[in-house]
């Protein structure tokens, strides 16, 4: 297979990975935002699990082709610490965002009658009140400002990417074996959501928020999406990018050098490259999904 064709396959793989995650994640967001009573009212863990299983399925479906970064924060961290090609970073991120847009379009196709009914019943508008916006993109929850959410996104994404680097480290003898890593990464995403989702809907993935937010902007949510209340739109982009670098760096420089059989002389700098998760043909990662209600919805959603 030519290098050009292989690279095209990697981009398609990243697109499909985020598409899968958003179809599952934004659909469960629709279930909790649009229905009253909603099926997850007293079972928030179920919401987190759906997001996590979406990530797991995406990894199993696409990991052999691109490594399933499915998150610009992960792609950036891999380029910095594990030798992923810098020339692929922007194309991967673009494919991921496009996957988020497409995933949101599929969810809208399924739920738009319910969205319209919800807004009509509650006398909300899309652009003015942000009615049902929580189906597609995130916003700070109770008592959380945009700047505090920026800190939250750094911390939560650092936890995510730290975990991904640990789970996929070739020197970590306690890491899951074979393809079980995909399930553990999905559970990690779910655990982050279940423990911190109400703060700001745990985007922890720029493509997960920016892609659906872009779709929603053109689907009538307008200023509720961009710039959004508190001019929040940039937070789920910048916060995860910073957090991913921080979390990966903590793992690379505090634990990895002490792993059994670690020998920096056996490979390139940063190089658990091929055996771990930066290159295609390896089951790898996924960042995380999420949501929260804006304008009209009463409770912060994951």
Image (tube, rainbow, N blue to C red):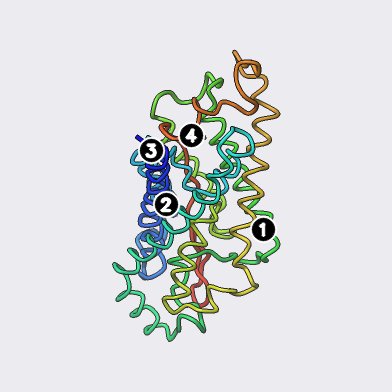
Q: Position of residue 9 (x, y in %)?
A: 37, 44
Tag 4: Cα neighbours inside 10 Å, few (<14), some, or many (≥20)? many
Q: Which residue is mark 1?
A: 150
Q: On the image, numbered disc 2 is attached to which residue?
A: 18
The residue depicted at 62 percent of the width and 19 percent of the height is 259
Badge 3 local density, few (<14 within 10 Å), some, or many (20+)? Answer: many
Of discs 1 and 3, which sits in the foreground?
3
Q: Secondary structure at mark 3?
A: helix
- In the image, 196 versus 17, the foreground residue is 17
Front disc: 2 or 3: 3
| Marks 4,2: beta carbons within 8 A | no
Q: Is residue 235 above or below residue 172?
A: below
Q: CA distance from mark 3 to mark 4?
A: 9 Å
Residue occupied by mark 4: 279
User: How far is disc 1 from disc 4 in space, using C-alphas?
Assistant: 29 Å
Q: Disc 4 or disc 2, which is closer to the eye?
A: 4
Q: In whole angstroms, how far apart are the C-alphas of marks 2 and 3?
A: 14 Å
Q: Residue at x 62, y 50 (%)?
A: 241
Residue at the (49%, 73%) spot, across then down: 297
The CA span between labels 2 and 1 is 22 Å
Q: Residue at x 53, y 59 (%)?
A: 201
Mark toward the start of the polypeptide (1 vs 3): 3
Identify which residue, 133 or 168, lies in the foreground.
168
Question: In the current view of this chain or complex, which residue is farthest to the top?
Answer: 261
Looking at the picture, tell me which residue is in the foreground, 4 or 172.
Answer: 4
* Vertical position of residue 127 compared to residue 54: above or below: below
SS of the residue at dot 1? helix
């Amino acid at each position: 297979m030519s290098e050009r064709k292989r690279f095209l396959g990697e981009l398609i793989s990243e697109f499909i990975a985020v598409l899968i995650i958003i179809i599952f994640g934004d659909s469960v967001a629709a279930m909790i935002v649009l229905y009253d009573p909603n099926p997850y009212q007293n079972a928030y863990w179920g919401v987190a699990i759906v997001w996590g299983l979406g990530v797991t399925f995406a990894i199993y479906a696409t990991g052999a082709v691109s490594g399933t970064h499915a998150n610009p924060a992960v792609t950036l961290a891999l380029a910095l610490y594990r030798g992923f090609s810098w020339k692929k970073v922007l194309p991967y991120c673009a494919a991921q965002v496009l996957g988020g847009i497409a995933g949101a379009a599929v969810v809208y196709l399924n739920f738009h009658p319910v969205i319209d009914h919800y807004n009509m019943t509650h006398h909300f508008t899309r652009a003015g009140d942000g009615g049902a916006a929580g189906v597609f993109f995130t916003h700070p929850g109770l008592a959380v400002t945009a700047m505090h959410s920026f800190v939250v996104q750094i911390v939560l994404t650092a936890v995510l990417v730290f975990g991904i680097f640990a789970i996929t480290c070739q020197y970590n003898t306690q890491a899951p074996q074979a393809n079980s890593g995909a399930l553990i990464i999905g559970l990690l995403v779910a655990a982050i959501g279940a423990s911190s989702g109400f703060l700001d809907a745990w985007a922890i993935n720029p493509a997960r928020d920016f892609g659906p937010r872009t779709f929603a902007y053109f689907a009538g949510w307008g200023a509720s999406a961009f710039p959004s209340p508190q001019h929040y739109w940039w937070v789920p982009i910048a916060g995860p990018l910073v957090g991913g670098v921080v979390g990966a760096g903590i793992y690379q420089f505090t634990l990895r050098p002490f792993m059994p059989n670690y020998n920096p002389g056996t490979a390139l700098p940063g190089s658990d490259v091929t055996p771990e998760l930066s290159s295609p043909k390896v089951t790898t990662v996924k960042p995380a999904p999420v949501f929260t209600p804006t304008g009209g919805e009463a409770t912060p959603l994951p």
